[in-house]
Image (cartoon, rainbow, N blue to C red):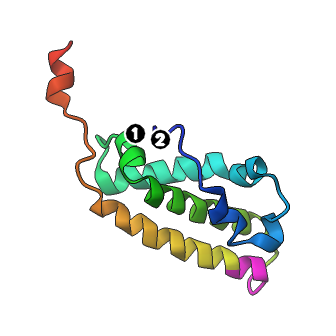
Amino acid sequence: MTYADLEVDVNDIKVRESKLFGTWSDTNAKAVMKSIAKEQMERDLYDALGTSADLDTVADTYTTHVQRALAYLQLHLFFVDNHTGDGTVNAMKATHYGSLYAKERDRFKTFGGTTLDTTVITAWR
């Protein structure tokens, strides 16, 4: 799997928030804040692994972890975008999913062997 192909496991969204997303199509549920979340997660992965990290290898090797992280981040961003003030249910959900994403983001540092071997690439030039 490449990073570009990475999508959440739709159950991570629909099961966690069944009252809200339970009736949505799988396609629509997967699309919730997807582009923004993937861009932010890409920056977080590079911050954790270095700018030479091969995100395709990360996505392929740690699929379950990055899918879960992406789901948490998408839900966090959705609830941040849709709350009407501190103390509301959506504000609390935004905080909850933000903390779950932060835990997953901290695990990015433990992903090993994800950098490209630039000596091999250089040899082909």
What residue appears at the point 30 percent right and 57 percent down from the top-left corner? 111
Any magenta on residue 91? yes
Q: Is residue 35 shown in magenta?
A: no
Magenta-tinted stretch: 86-92
**Residue contact at pointers 1 and 2, CB within 8 angstroms:** yes
Residue tagged by mark 2?
Answer: 3
Residue nearest the viewer, comparing 91 with 17? 17
Which residue ends up furthest to the bottom in the rendered image? 87
Say how many tags the image has.
Answer: 2
Task: Say which label, 1 or 2, has the lower sequence index.
Answer: 2
Residue in the image at 23% along x and 48% along y? 113
Alpha-carbon neighbours of circle 2 within 10 Å: few (<14), some, or many (≥20)?
some
Question: Can see residue 69?
Answer: yes
SS assignment at label 1: helix
Label 2 secondary element: loop
Q: What residue type is labelled 1?
A: Asp
Kind of residue indicated by mark 2: Tyr
Residue 114 in the image: x percent, y percent?
A: 28, 46
- Residue 56 — which label? 1
Q: Label 1: few (<14), some or many (≥20) within 10 Å?
A: some
26 or 118: nearer the eye?
26
Q: Can residue 83 be seen?
A: no
Q: Residue 81: give x, y in percent of width and height.
A: 74, 63
